[in-house]
Image (cartoon, grey):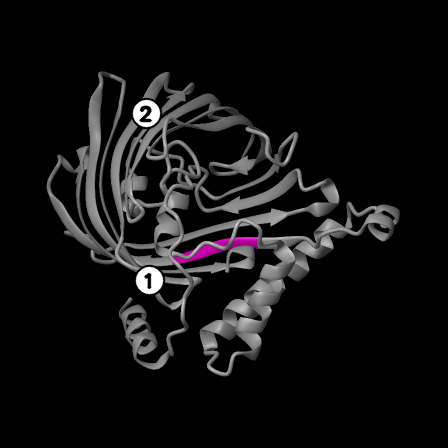
Amino acid sequence: MLCLTVVYCHLLLTAPVTPGSAVGTVNSPANATSVGTSYSDIARPAPPLTAHTESTEENTNSSASSAPNAQWFDIWQRSFTDTMDFTVKQLDGLFEDEEETQTQGQKQARAEGRIQLAWEPRSGMLSDTDLRFRVRVRLPALKERVDLLLSDNEDETQNNTIRAARDSGSNTRDRTTIALRFRPEQDSHYSFRIGAGRRDQLYAMTRYRDALAFSDQWAMLYDAELYYYTRDRLGAEAGLAFQYEISKKHLVRQNNRFYFRDDTNDWLWRHEVHHLFSVDQHNAVIPHFMVEGLSQPNYRVEEVYTGFRWRNNMLRDWLFFEVEPFVLWLREEDFKTSYGIALRVEAYYGRDT
């Protein structure tokens, strides 16, 4: 991980800074219990709502390949995106209707996602590392109602915690997952999935997700899931979040989530508070606090986590660096105070770049 630090310093010293667009709005939440979208938007300029995939692809190609100040990481990002796009176009071609394509035209299949590398040393655990990834493949040949999803973690609401917190004894959801997601309509609140995860278990899932705005500042987000795994059997989740936009640069969100586990007949619960502060168009800080526990053998706390994250994308809009001092208390470690710091590099590719 020393190499990671050296690379980061090298980039800061050698890579030219490209001008960024205006700071994206912070009131565009993803789901009821994740700060994923708002968290990214507050430190990452968002594309205009009227922008289409074609224009984004054109901008990405020109910025990476024709820019005179392109660096090796620009070439890597463009090559990786092209490779992913070529693969998914071949997959989408299996479902393509040639007559419909010739008469009406059709958008091209694209892949988008992120890759994150992290070093998360803490008291007594100096070698802790983490690899996060998420890939979404859009398939226009299937009316853009079917996506292929690949992720290191089925729990999309735990994007912003360290690995030690996700890998606690009460949480076995941190497993690579691949699934097909179907939506009755492109803007439907319902979605259905079939796939494999949790150590090669087959599963089926249905989800409902929606949001309610009480005013320009207050909003409530909620979602519910029901799923069945071949070994873990039936499970359910419910999430509820309240969001308050103090100003264009300040947003506070309080998340609540409950998981029912049929194999152990108990509930896993989690409560979080995040304060997202956009310093400028390239920097954001996010102090946050989380507590997680179980309902059996009694309603008790299993872990407590708090951190202060700094997020920066000064070099490129799609490339982020993070530094997060944190403190962690785990029941399995007798709640001994564990101090640590997380250093992360995160790259986006595809439509979002």
Q: Earlier in the sequence, mark 2 or mark 1?
A: 2
Inspect the image, locate mark 2, and give the three-letter code of the amino acid beneath it: Leu
Residue identifier under label 1: 282
Q: Is residue 92 magenta?
A: no
Residue closer to the observer: 169 or 75:
75
Magenta stretch, residue numbers: 112-116
Inspect the image, locate mark 1, and give the three-letter code of the amino acid beneath it: His
Q: Residues within 10 Å of mark 2 (few under 14, many from 20)?
A: many
Residue 229 visible in this rendered orientation of the protein: no
**In the figure, is residue 87 to the left or right of 348?**
right
With respect to residue 278, does 176 lie above or below?
above
Residue identifier under label 2: 268
Quarter holding residue 8: bottom left
Quadrant containing the N terminus in the rendered view: bottom left
- Does dot 2 land on a helix, a strand or a loop? strand
Who's the residue at 88% across and 48% down the image?
Answer: 99
How many dots with numbers?
A: 2
Q: Position of residue 60 (x, y in %)?
A: 56, 66
Q: Residues within 10 Å of mark 1 (few under 14, many from 20)?
A: many
Residue 307 visible in this rendered orientation of the protein: yes
Residue closer to the observer: 201 or 110:
110
In front of the other: label 2 or label 1? 1
Who's the residue at 77% across and 48% down the image?
Answer: 94
2 and 1 marks in contact (CB < 8 Å): no
